[in-house]
């Protein structure tokens, strides 16, 4: 007889596989969000960075009236334009986006050890900053969730080229859902324009990927879409730790 945790893990695998098949067959983002709201394990959470992808997903969530917990991670280092986009988005869709912040004691300890700009000293120091300001808050925000909606797309970077529509995320014990996985940037921008979705004005200033202000710069034509993130590092595997590659759990591991 399976232990309860194993039963939950197996069920999440089955649901993820079913969603992965179904979402790929649906023609519109709204249809995909409708199926997610019906079939994904609940509660369903959506983490928005207020980027292009996430704004499109939020538009579809609002259009469908889907019961989703929408939250954003406020690292304390965002551009003013990003904060303004948050306010404009809440006003446009008449909803409150839950703002999740890092623990003050964690930030104080980090800065006391590495300094206010210590994240530029080494990759390890930068990842430690992301851990405190993003990864730990995300873990808290997803506690108790059954599914996690993200705005990942396959053509965002080489490291995301194999993103599935739905997969088990063992670390957070959720079904991780990426309804825009197969969308091109052109399709995304056309959707945003057609639906007059509010977007961060920094995109028009040459910022194709927007993170914390000290860690993001504008890019030049021909550069990779994520070249402006942590630009002082090498180009390989530039992630903050929020999106480790989901994998199917080993037998007996809860999802």
Image: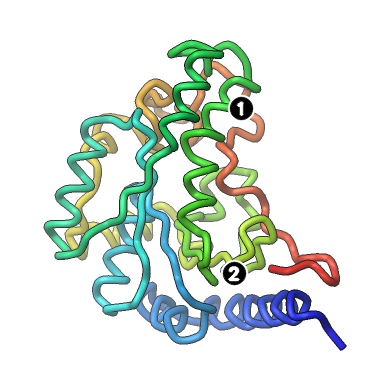
Q: Quadrant of residue 217?
A: top left
Gap between marks 2 and 1, in whole Å? 29 Å
Along the viewing direction, whichever of 157 and 117 lies nearer the viewer:
117
Which residue appears at 51% of the width and 24% of the height? 230
* Colouring scheme applied when the structure was drawn: rainbow
Q: Residues within 10 Å of mark 2 (few under 14, many from 20)?
A: many
Residue 175: numbered disc? 2
Q: Secondary structure at mark 1?
A: loop
Judge whether 100 appears above or below 252 on screen.
above
Q: Earlier in the sequence, mark 2 or mark 1?
A: 2
Judge whether 143 appears above or below 110 on screen.
below
Judge whether 208 appears above or below 58 on screen.
above
Along the viewing direction, whichever of 124 and 209 lies nearer the viewer:
124
In the drawing, does residue 168 fall left or right of residue 145? right
Which residue appears at 59% of the width and 27% of the height? 128
| Residue that label 1 marks | 235
In the drawing, does residue 233 fall left or right of residue 209? right
Q: Measured from the top left, where is residue 16 in percent x and y? A: 63, 76
- The quadrant the C terminus occupies is bottom right
Judge whether 190 appears above or below 80 on screen.
below
Q: Measured from the top left, where is residue 215 in percent x and y? A: 44, 24
């Amino acid at each position: 007889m399976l232990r309860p945790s194993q039963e939950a893990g197996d069920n999440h695998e089955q649901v993820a596989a079913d969603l992965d098949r179904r979402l790929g067959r649906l023609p519109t983002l709204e249809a995909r969000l409708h199926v997610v709201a019906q079939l994904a394990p609940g509660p369903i959470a959506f983490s928005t960075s207020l980027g292009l992808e996430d704004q499109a997903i939020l538009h579809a969530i609002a259009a469908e009236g889907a019961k989703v917990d929408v939250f954003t991670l406020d690292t304390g280092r965002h551009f003013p334009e990003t904060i303004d986009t948050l306010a404009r988005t809440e006003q446009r869709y008449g909803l409150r986006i839950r703002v999740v912040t890092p623990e003050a004691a964690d930030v104080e300890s980090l800065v006391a050890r590495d300094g206010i700009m210590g994240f530029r000293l080494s990759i390890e120091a930068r990842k430690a900053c992301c851990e405190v300001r993003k990864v730990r808050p995300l873990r808290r925000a997803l506690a108790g969730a059954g599914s996690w909606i993200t705005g990942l797309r396959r053509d965002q970077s080489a490291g995301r080229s194999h993103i599935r529509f739905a997969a088990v995320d063992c670390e957070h014990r959720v079904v991780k859902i990426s309804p825009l996985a197969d969308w091109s940037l052109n399709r995304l921008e056309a959707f945003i324009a057609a639906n007059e979705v509010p977007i961060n004005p920094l995109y028009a200033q040459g910022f194709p990927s927007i993170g914390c202000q000290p860690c993001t710069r504008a890019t030049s034509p021909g550069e990779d879409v994520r070249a402006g993130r942590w630009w002082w590092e090498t180009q390989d595997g530039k992630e903050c730790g929020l999106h480790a590659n989901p994998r199917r759990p080993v037998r007996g591991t809860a999802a």
